[in-house]
């Protein structure tokens, strides 16, 4: 399968950057049509959209959104130059639950790594350099979210960078 896939028009996907529409292993989570969306899910999805826009403005090309397998889910998968970037997005309204960057523990990291391996294997990208980034969005008083992007936030061996 061609890595770039078909590029869809930015206006059609609601994004400002090209997005791969390649299909295959993994899929986007679906909500039944008659179910009312959970406001927490909508809040998180909006955070993913904001993180995507942020990354696109910095030249990243989005390859997949909410890539899901039995191993877990990755919020965004992007390309920065030749590097495949697996992005976990965390959004917080308040600091009550702690720092969003610290909320990705060893179990979540392991799930992200397993899911990333599935993605790389499915697309024949074993030799491609990759990294794990975290984009944290903290709500500021009426000014919109403050974005903190940690490149190479942790490594596949479980150590923080």
Image (cartoon, rainbow, N blue to C red):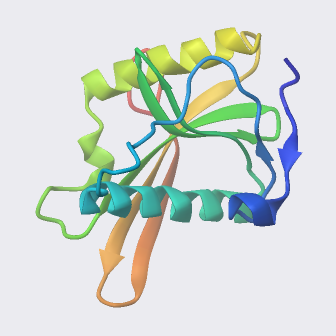
Q: Quadrant of residue 51?
A: bottom right
Could you say which is closer to the camera, residue 77 or residue 136?
77
Q: Quadrant of residue 2?
A: top right
Q: Quadrant of residue 118?
A: top right
Above or below, comparing residue 2 to residue 15 in the picture: above
Which image quadrant: the C terminus? top left
Above or below, comparing residue 134 to residue 136 in the picture: above
Query: Which residue is located at x 72 percent, y 23 percent?
Result: 129
Q: Residue 135: x percent and y percent?
A: 47, 53
Which image quadrant: the N terminus? top right
Query: Which residue is located at x 63 percent, y 64 percent?
Result: 53
Query: Which residue is located at x 54 percent, y 60 percent?
Result: 49
Question: In the image, is 28 to the left or to the right of 137?
Answer: right
Question: In the image, is 44 to the left or to the right of 150?
Answer: left
Q: Residue 93: x percent and y percent?
A: 25, 69
Query: Which residue is located at x 26 percent, y 45 percent?
Result: 102
Residue 55 can be seen in this image: yes
Could you say which is closer to the camera, residue 79 or residue 24?
24
Q: Residue 57: x percent and y percent?
A: 72, 65
Above or below, comparing residue 101 to residue 93 in the picture: above
Residue 153 can be seen in this image: no
Q: Residue 125: x percent and y percent?
A: 75, 15
Question: In the image, is 156 to the left or to the right of 44?
Answer: right
Above or below, comparing residue 39 to residue 1 in the picture: below
């Amino acid at each position: 399968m061609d890595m770039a896939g078909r590029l869809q028009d930015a206006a059609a996907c609601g994004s400002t950057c090209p997005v791969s529409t390649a299909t295959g292993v993994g899929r986007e989570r679906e909500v039944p049509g008659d179910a009312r969306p959970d406001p927490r899910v909508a809040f998180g999805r909006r955070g993913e959209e904001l993180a995507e826009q942020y990354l696109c403005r910095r030249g990243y090309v989005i390859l997949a959104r909410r890539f899901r397998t039995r191993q877990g889910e990755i919020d965004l998968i992007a390309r920065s130059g030749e590097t495949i970037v697996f992005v976990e997005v965390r959004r917080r309204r308040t600091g009550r639950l702690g720092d969003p960057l610290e909320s990705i523990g060893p179990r979540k990291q392991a799930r992200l790594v397993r899911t990333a391996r599935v993605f790389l294997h499915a697309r024949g990208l074993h030799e491609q350099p990759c990294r794990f980034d975290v984009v944290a969005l903290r709500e500021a008083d009426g000014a919109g979210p403050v974005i903190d992007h940690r490149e190479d936030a942790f490594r596949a061996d479980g150590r923080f960078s």
